[in-house]
Image (cartoon, helix red, strand yellow):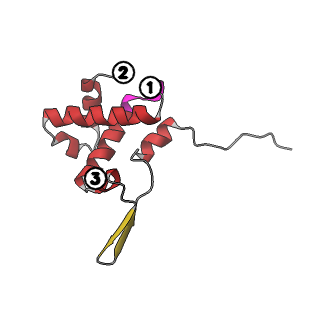
Amino acid sequence: MFEFEDIKSYIEQLDNGALFNNLSPEDKEKAIFTSSELLKDYFPIDKLTIRAIALQVLYSIEGEEEEYAKLKRHGVTHYSVKGVSVQFDGSGISPAVVNLIVDTSKAKVKGLI
C-alpha cells in the first residue's frame, strides 16, 4: 500500500486541500487510514492509487465538515428542514474516485460502413 507521507504530500499540493491542511497530524493520519480502508472495501487494492485515496480523503473531510457524512452513516437517506429537502444517494465513495477506478466508458469504436 502507499505511505502516509506520499498521500499527505499529494493532498497538500491540491488547491482544495485546505480542510485537510487544517487538521492536526493525528487527524490527518486517521483521515487517510479511514479513507483507504473504505476504498479497500469496494475496490481491489491494485486499483487504488495515491490520487484515488487523496480524493477520497478530501471528499470524506468535506462530508464531515458539512455533517452529511454523519447522517449517511446513520442510515438517513433523505430529510427536509424549513422547506429544503435533501436526498442522499451512493455509498460514501467520491464520484471522482469511482470515475478513476471504474471504467465507465461504454462507448465502443466501430468501423464506418
Under circle 1, the secondary element is helix
Under circle 3, the secondary element is helix
- Judging by the rendered image, the residue that carries numbered circle 2 is 1
Upstream in sequence: badge 1 or badge 2: 2
- Camera-side residue of 30 and 103: 30
- Camera-side residue of 43 and 18: 43
Q: Residue at x 34, y 54 (%)?
A: 72
The C terminus lies in quadrant: top right
User: Could you tell me if the residues under marks 1 and 2 are in contact, i.e. CB atoms within 8 Å?
Assistant: yes
Q: In 3D space, how far apart are the residues under numbered discs 3 and 1 (Cα atoms)?
A: 26 Å
Query: Residue flagged by tag 1: what amino acid is it?
Result: Ile
| Magenta region, residue range | 46-51
- Judging by the rendered image, the residue that carries numbered circle 3 is 70
Tell me if residue 49 is in the magenta stretch.
yes
Tell me if residue 23 is in the magenta stretch.
no
Which label belongs to residue 20?
none
Query: Residue flagged by tag 3: what amino acid is it?
Result: Lys
